[in-house]
Amino acid sequence: MKSISDRAEVSIDFPDKAYMGAFGRESGFDVKVEPDEVLLRIVRAGEERREVAVHLHYYLLGDILKELGRGLAEHGFLDDAHLHALQAGADALTQALKESKPSKG
């Protein structure tokens, strides 16, 4: 489990109720890469324990990344610290994709 360096907020809205949770620096996350999807898990330990798991298939994840890129290009409001953090993540993803070999099937 890796430490969260900033903050995450999660909300799930149903017709008759809503669930909300915040995860800060005392929380952790992990990412599990599977053949068909990515699992993102965020965990807050302790007395107010909570856990969120999100399974994203690669087509949806690709669409999300494209929209993130479009939104950032359109608004351009990131400060240097956030810009560098996203650039480092994007560089790591780009390098891994270049080195990845397509599976047969």
Image (tube, rainbow, N blue to C red):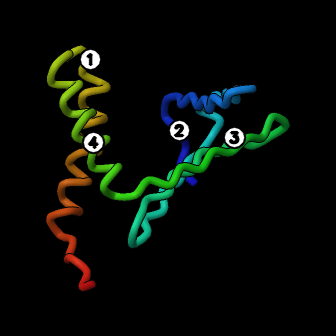
Work out how far the residue at label 1 is from the one at label 3, CA to CA, in angstroms.
28 Å
Answer with mark 1 or mark 4, whichever residue precedes in sequence: 4
User: Splitting the image into 4 quarters, where does residue 70 fall?
Assistant: top left
- Front position among marks 4 and 2: 4
Q: Secondary structure at mark 4?
A: helix
Q: Earlier in the sequence, mark 2 or mark 3?
A: 2
Q: CA distance from mark 1 to mark 4?
A: 19 Å
**Sequence-first tag of 4 and 2:** 2
Q: What amino acid is found at the position of numbered circle 3 in the picture?
A: Arg
Determine whether the residue tagged by mark 3 lies in a helix, strand or loop: strand
Relative depth, front residue between 98 and 6 = 98
Instruction: Tell me if residue 24 can be seen.
Output: no
Q: Are marks 3 and 4 in contact (CB under 8 Å)?
A: no
Residue 82 in the image: state x and y as whole percent.
31, 26
Precedes in sequence: disc 1 or disc 3: 3
* Between 15 and 79, the one nearer to me in the picture: 15
> Residue at 78% of width from left, 40% of height from top?
49
Disc 1 and disc 2: Cα gap in Å? 19 Å
Numbered mark located on residue 65 in the image: 4
Q: Position of residue 65 (x, y in %)?
A: 27, 42
Residue marked by disc 1: 79
Give the residue type that dot 1 points to: Asp
Residue highlighted by disc 3: 44
Q: Name the residue beneath numbered marker 2.
A: 4
Instruction: Kindly report the distance in space between the C-alpha atoms of the residues bearing marks 2 and 3.
Output: 10 Å
Q: Is residue 96 visible?
A: yes
Viewer-nearest of discs 1 and 4: 4
User: SS at mark 1?
Assistant: loop
Q: CA distance from mark 4 to mark 2?
A: 20 Å
- Which quarter of the figure is the N terminus placed in? bottom right
